[in-house]
Amino acid sequence: MASATGLSHAEGAARYAELPAPTLKDEAWRFTDLAGFDPAAFAATGPAAAVTHDPLLDIAVAALATVTETGLIVERAPAGITFAPLPPDHALLGSLVGADEKFAAHNAALWTHGLLVHVPQGVVLDAPLYVKVVNTIEGGSLFFRMLVIADPGSRFTLIEEYSSTSPQLSSYSNAVVELVVEQGARLEYVSIQNLSQQTWHFASHHGKVGRDAELDWVAGGFGSKKGKVRIQNDLAAPGATSRVTGAYFADGTQHLDYDTFQEHIAPNTTSDFAFKGALRDEARTVWRGMIRVEKDAQKTDAYQQNRNLLLSKTAHADSIPGLEIMANDVRCTHGATLGQVDRDMLFYLMARGLSRHEAERMIVRGFFQDVLDRIEIEHVRNALGDALEARIPH
């Protein structure tokens, strides 16, 4: 059945067949080569491997759902909200992420185990909702879709974590998340990608923020082999605010690609975007960020920054910030930096008795501290800091 947006599985499949695979000639993909990736090769089926709830974030939760290639299990959910399978005919399904991009179309064609999160008007949840999306089948694929609706005046935290049952699991992960934050609502959205380094991961996350509403977004990237993650915020009504805080670490031959878009549609809106990454070995990262201010979006206040720390001479990071401004009464700033580990600082710390890895761990923690300080949830802040430090070898 098609949704109100006219997007059925069959139509998604048709669009996927029509759209060409991205190549290095496409501007958005010129630093991410998909040679060697064949989605059709990930067709293995079978029973899902056993999944235990061992999340990166050790935190008490109000609701817990686990998604695998074979199904969705909701273990618990608080009364009065919807935390349940996503109906394929929901009126808002596809309203933010349709099928106009190759991987989003693939998701529209093949998702089967989706989650609907709907918190009614005025409801305030003290503990987070937790969604664990787990690739479990060697050579398999997992298409996940989630629709989140924060009704006017609601306040809650939603955490999703992408992981694999084995660090050597070779698989394909494709996710689409749509976030609708209505008037006066506040959503804290934490999305952590901790997949195996043999998994291709593609995702589109798109939020729409209403009048006087707030979307506080935390993104963590630690796993996967290669792919692209899209993050978009629409500041759609006066007083809308979004804040995105990102931290990632890549090593080995990992290739992480983030494509971010802050669109200011209405006047008196604010967006604040800060991403930091550390790289070692032969890892590579790409960040492409765009702030777009529509002609009627006067009094926009927008900021974006991306900073990268290279822990080896063979690591490489590309940062491409951009502004597209049609209004004339705005404040928009952006920046990107790239740097090696400060050798004088490393020598200073080692001269005071620290081993090299202890010194590098301290430098990495210091590099990330300002973005970690932006994260209001203490358990999330501490867990991400620990995960970043843990990537430094002993």
Image (tube, rainbow, N blue to C red):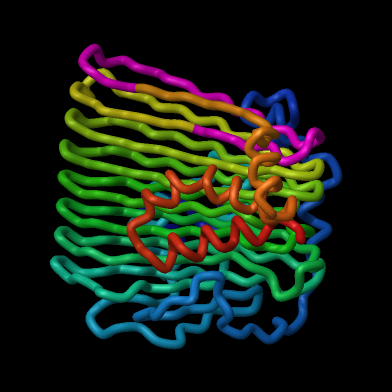
Q: Nearer the viewer, residue 233 or 140?
A: 233
Residue 117 in picture, x, y percent from top left: 35, 69
Query: Is 317 contained in the magenta span?
Result: yes
Q: Is residue 318 visible?
A: yes
Q: Is residue 109 visible?
A: no
Q: Residue furthest front?
A: 352
Quarter of the image for residue 326 reads: top left
The residue shown at (32%, 29%) is 302
Q: Residue furthest right?
A: 36
The residue shown at (32%, 46%) is 208
The boundaries of the magenta stretch are 306-332
Q: Nearer the viewer, residue 161 or 344?
A: 344
Q: How many marks?
A: 0
Location of residue 156 with respect to 222 vertically, above or below: below
Residue 128 in picture, x, y percent from top left: 35, 72
Residue 179 in picture, x, y percent from top left: 36, 54
Q: Nearer the viewer, residue 363 or 387?
A: 363
Location of residue 115 with respect to 343 vertically, above or below: below
Question: Is residue 198 rendered to the left or right of residue 264?
Answer: right
Residue 282 in picture, x, y percent from top left: 81, 41
The residue shown at (57%, 25%) is 320
Q: Residue furthest top?
A: 328
Query: Is 270 contained in the magenta span?
Result: no
Location of residue 376 with respect to 66 vertically, above or below: above
Location of the C terminus by quadrant is: bottom right
The residue shown at (59%, 42%) is 277
Question: Is residue 260 rendered to the left or right of residue 197?
Answer: left
Quarter of the image for residue 130 reads: bottom left
Q: What predominant SS class does the magenta segment belong to?
A: strand
